[in-house]
């Protein structure tokens, strides 16, 4: 093993960064075939049916892949061609499960990858998924693919051996873990923000060179020095700091796996999907004390190909990953805020022209229509019942006055404050009034053809007197001014409006602590070309900095979404901005789906 430790950012000084130089020559390498389109009808929940066609040949789709007995979620596609079984893996899963490093691709039907050598692989598409054909690579590695009786894809491969391990610490936050193997293998990396675990599909050699499996021969194999622990024969754990990024790649002839850890080890790349969709990865201010790692999904304005849909996890919160996995979502991002104690939504949600919950506190919202036109603005909510204001609809946010809860909230309403007066309205008439207190907070059924009014604050007694049993109630519904936008999700604050940074979190009712906070952030924006930007920013990012980032990305309008542990960007079956173990459950999200057949040309 090479024991010298060169500065990590200087890629030209170390032979282990040979792939970077190879990238300069990648245009000379031969191609292995042309991309293939795979037609698939849209479904609400994917079942991966057989009978798909690739170039007129029947193909099979699956979502679980076993590698030497260990099962992973990794959508796959197989078909017969010239007497040979061909196999393609969803591109993000190929990176996260097998270890392929996806490189910038100018052609969406070709995908250059670095995986124990530089390769340029053909790509196939379904309506919502992009697959990389890895047939020739598996053949080169002497790996085989089959399908078991339960429909699971099975990759069987020779067991690789780990012959050497180096962990090198430069002393200023940059570290490098290097594994030397006797053959190519697959590997997976997880990172919970405190420790990262690298699992290599191989095992420590039976008679290893002891010096190479310790730090300069001074420490035993388990634990290793400098914060690395060998958990078992193929699992390595190492510490990471809050601002650390982790970059993993492989070398060819030496069959090495390298992991770089530090504040600015991620590179930049643009992965082009079909129809102009892009996944971009950027590192901003890499030499600053607080660099920002960006993942961006750029969506072209093609309503005949794509549509946005709100997703509401109102009574059963899910992570961003579980919100979209198992559906035909192409991409998705977390959206609005919610009360973490009660697990109930706080902001606006409008679907198919119907308000499921109303805006609060003049906070920012994003609205869109089937033509993928977006609008962003600040909204107040106000209805009237018998001429009296109702300031809240189906929300966990509470304030003095009246709030309305209809069947879209759920089957029942349980008082959110200790003291409320509830008026039950069915078919326009007050059927009951209930005064609640800390010892009496029942779950009150919400009439199917009505709603309940929750009356709160010091004036609840005088307001409740306006709604005795038998009173006829006239509801003047909320006029939002967004009739052209049937879908709306609220979050905030508004970041950019008409090319101007307009951040004013205080005016939108956010707390001083929220205003000062630096955290990971999510945002949605639109540029002058009408392209939609779904952005996840990881690092210590202030609201003002997030607004600047959106402007730098070309957004003319942008809205901040829920952030911190809620930040999550989904693409092709996986999270692309963080390890799934670190993602929190969310109340709602925005998903990108294939256009319905009626919308297509």
Image (spheres, grey):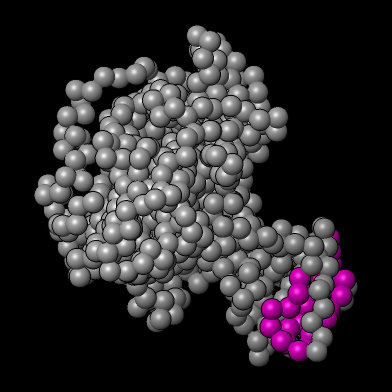
Q: Position of residue 23 (x, y in %)?
A: 20, 35
Q: As drawn, which residue projects farthest toward the left?
A: 13
Horizontally, residue 322 falls left or right of residue 2, namely right
Q: Is residue 186 above or below residue 343?
A: above
- Please say if 232 is above or below 183: below
Q: Nearer the viewer, residue 319 or 202?
A: 202
Residue 137 image offset from top left, x and y in percent: 39, 27
Instruction: Please tell me whether residue 340 belongs to the stretch shown in magenta.
Output: no
Q: Is residue 81 found left or right of 429 in the rendered image?
A: left
Residue at x-position 45% and y-position 53%:
234
Of 432 and 204, which appears nearest the observer? 204
Q: Quadrant of residue 122?
A: top left
Count of numbered circles on the image:
0
Residue 142 % position (x, y): 44, 27
As drawn, the residue found furthest toward the front would be 207
Residue at x 27% of width, y 40% of height? 254
Q: Is residue 181 visible?
A: yes
Which quadrant would residue 550 be assigned to in this image? bottom left
Question: Majority secondary structure of the magenta segment?
Answer: strand
Image coordinates for residue 312, horizontal then vertical, percent: 62, 55
The residue under the point 42% across, 59% down is 236
Q: Is residue 414 covered in magenta? A: yes
Task: Judge by depth and name the residue closer to the eye, 9 or 380.
Answer: 9
The answer, for residue 526, to whether it is visible in the render is no
Q: In the displayed structure, does residue 488 sit left or right of residue 474?
A: left
Quarter of image, res 530:
top left
Question: Left or right of 168: which side holds 584?
Answer: right
- For the record, the magenta segment spans 413-438
Q: Residue at x 35, y 78 (%)?
A: 516
């Amino acid at each position: 093993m090479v024991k010298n430790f060169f500065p990590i950012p200087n890629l030209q000084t170390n032979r282990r960064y040979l792939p970077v130089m190879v990238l300069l020559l990648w245009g000379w390498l031969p191609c292995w075939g042309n991309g293939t389109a795979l037609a698939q009808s849209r479904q609400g929940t994917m079942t991966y049916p057989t009978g798909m066609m690739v170039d007129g040949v029947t193909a099979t789709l699956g979502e679980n892949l076993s590698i030497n007995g260990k099962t992973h979620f990794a959508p796959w596609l197989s078909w017969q061609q010239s007497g040979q079984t061909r196999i393609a893996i969803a591109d993000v899963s190929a990176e996260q499960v097998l270890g392929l490093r996806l490189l910038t691709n100018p052609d969406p039907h070709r995908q250059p990858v670095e995986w124990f050598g530089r390769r340029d692989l053909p790509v196939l598409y379904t309506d919502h998924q992009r697959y990389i054909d890895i047939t020739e690579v598996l053949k080169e590695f002497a790996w085989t693919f089959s399908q078991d009786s339960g429909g699971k894809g099975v990759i069987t491969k020779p067991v690789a051996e780990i012959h050497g391990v180096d962990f090198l610490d430069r002393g200023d936050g940059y570290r490098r873990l290097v594994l030397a193997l006797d053959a190519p293998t697959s590997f997976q990396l997880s990172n919970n923000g405190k420790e990262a675990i690298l699992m290599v599909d191989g095992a420590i050699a039976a008679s290893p060179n002891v010096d190479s499996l310790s730090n300069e021969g001074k420490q035993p194999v388990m634990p290793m020095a400098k914060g690395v622990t060998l958990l078992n024969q193929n699992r390595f754990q190492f510490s990471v700091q809050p601002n650390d990024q982790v970059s993993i790649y492989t070398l060819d002839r030496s069959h090495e796996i390298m992991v770089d850890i530090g504040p600015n080890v991620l590179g930049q790349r643009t992965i082009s999907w079909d129809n102009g969709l892009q996944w971009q990865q950027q590192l901003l201010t890499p030499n600053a004390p607080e660099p920002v790692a960006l993942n961006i999904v750029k969506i072209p304005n093609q309503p005949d190909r794509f549509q946005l849909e709100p997703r509401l996890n109102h009574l059963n919160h899910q992570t961003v990953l579980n919100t979209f996995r198992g559906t035909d979502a192409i991409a998705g991002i977390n959206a609005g805020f919610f009360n973490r104690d009660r697990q109930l939504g706080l902001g606006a949600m409008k679907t198919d022209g119907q308000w499921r919950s109303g805006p609060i506190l003049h906070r920012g919202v994003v609205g869109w229509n089937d033509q993928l036109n977006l609008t962003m603005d600040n909204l107040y909510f106000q209805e009237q019942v018998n001429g009296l204001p109702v300031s809240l609809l189906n929300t966990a946010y509470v304030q003095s006055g009246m709030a309305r809860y209809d069947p879209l909230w759920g089957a029942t309403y349980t008082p959110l404050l200790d003291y409320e007066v509830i008026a039950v309205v069915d078919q326009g008439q007050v059927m009951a009034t209930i005064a609640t207190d800390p010892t009496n907070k029942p779950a009150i059924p919400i009439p199917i053809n009505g709603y309940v009014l929750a009356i709160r604050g010091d004036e609840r007694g005088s307001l409740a007197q306006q709604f005795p049993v038998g009173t006829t109630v006239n509801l003047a519904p909320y006029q939002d001014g967004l009739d052209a936008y049937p879908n709306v999700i609220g979050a905030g604050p508004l970041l950019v409006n008409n090319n101007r940074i307009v951040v004013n979190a205080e005016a939108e009712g956010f707390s001083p602590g929220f205003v000062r906070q630096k955290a990971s952030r999510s945002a949605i924006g639109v540029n002058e070309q009408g392209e939609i930007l779904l952005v996840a920013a990881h690092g210590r990012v202030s609201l003002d900095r997030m607004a600047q980032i959106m402007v730098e990305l070309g957004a003319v309008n942008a809205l901040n979404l829920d952030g911190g542990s809620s930040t999550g960007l989904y693409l092709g079956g996986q999270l692309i901005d963080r390890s799934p173990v670190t993602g929190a459950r969310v109340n709602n999200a925005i998903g990108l789906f294939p256009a319905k057949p009626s919308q297509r040309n």
